[in-house]
Amino acid sequence: MIPVLLLKGDLLYKSVQFKDHKYVGDPRIAVKIFNDKGCDELVLLDITATNEGRRPNFQLIEEIASEAFMPVAYGGGVRTQEDFAQIIRLGVEKVVLCTRAAEDTDFIAEASRIHGAQSVVVCMDVKKNWMGKPQVMTHAGTKAAPVGILDFARKVAAAGAGEIIVNSVDRDGTFKGYDLPLIRQVAAAVDVPVIACGGAGNLDHVVEAIRQGGASAAAAGSIFVFQGPHRAVLITFPEEAKLRAAFGH
């Protein structure tokens, strides 16, 4: 179970269907809380870097990597192999590619060759069009890639991606649960771990994503930063005993 924190510059925000961004705090403080709660892994995504033409915020990445007790994955604004290498040098274990992966699978192959497939994560932002057909989206969900979701998943896996995050734009921030049919399709199409993302509202949804969706892990944002019906900001993470109980252990 992996928290996903969304950055705009050097501050944390949370979205609903990639819109209506709400400020939720400082990423450095969030990392300290997740440290204290015993979180296993953390994903940080700068959601405005690509569209604003910004490179990754290396100073912030270094601060977070040095503070975190758990493996960290970072994505956003990665354009060159030097960007990728610099992030790894700063102590981040994995680099998440979205728009860059859709533009050039050779970039995935080169990064995988240099750093190992375990360092390369591709995030598929998937949104249904007006006909209900799921599409891979790039540029923070604003542009549709000219390739089908399963072809895209197979291409990036073959190129050397070690993991694929399947993120439902339509479910993002809704608390309605993961898009299980979507996760099942992608998980069945590739032989690399698939991480479900988008829509988690409780631990039962996490269990469903893994047991019914075939995901290897579940990522979420809102359930870790909002509490109660009024979505009050409170960064937290479930205790290990609750996680074990949810899975029947």
Image (tube, rainbow, N blue to C red):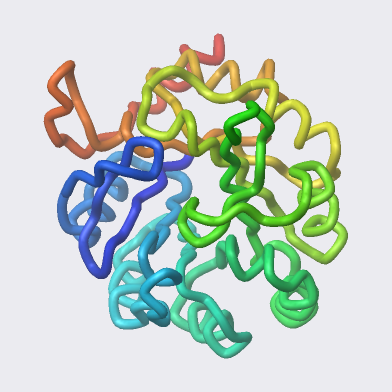
Q: Nearer the viewer, residue 86 or 201?
A: 201
Is 13 or 1 nearer to us in this picture? 13
Q: Residue furthest top?
A: 248
Relative depth, front residue between 24 and 59: 24
Q: Which quadrant does the C terminus fall into?
A: top right
Q: Count the marks: how many? A: 0
Question: Would you say 246 lies left or right of 48 here?
Answer: right
**For residue 228, above or below residue 46:** above
Q: Looking at the image, is 174 positioned above or below residue 3?
A: above
The picture places residue 212, in percent across and down from the top left corner, at: 68, 16
Instruction: Tell whether 48 sits left or right of 106.
Output: left
Residue 165 lies, in percent from the top left, at 61, 46
Q: Which residue shows up at 45% across the image and 53% down it? A: 43
Q: Is residue 143 above or below residue 228?
A: below
Which residue corresponds to the image point at 28% horizontal and 55% vertical from the top-left? 31
Q: Residue 28: where, in percent of width, then height?
A: 22, 61
**Residue 25 vertical placement versus 167 (above, below):** below
Which residue is located at x 43 percent, y 36 percent?
A: 220
* Residue at 38% across, 58% down: 69
Farthest-out residue, front: 130
Identify the residue at the far bottom of this view. Answer: 82
Residue 188, by quadrant, is: top right
- Expressed as whole percent of the image width and height from the top left, the position of residue 108 reads 73, 71
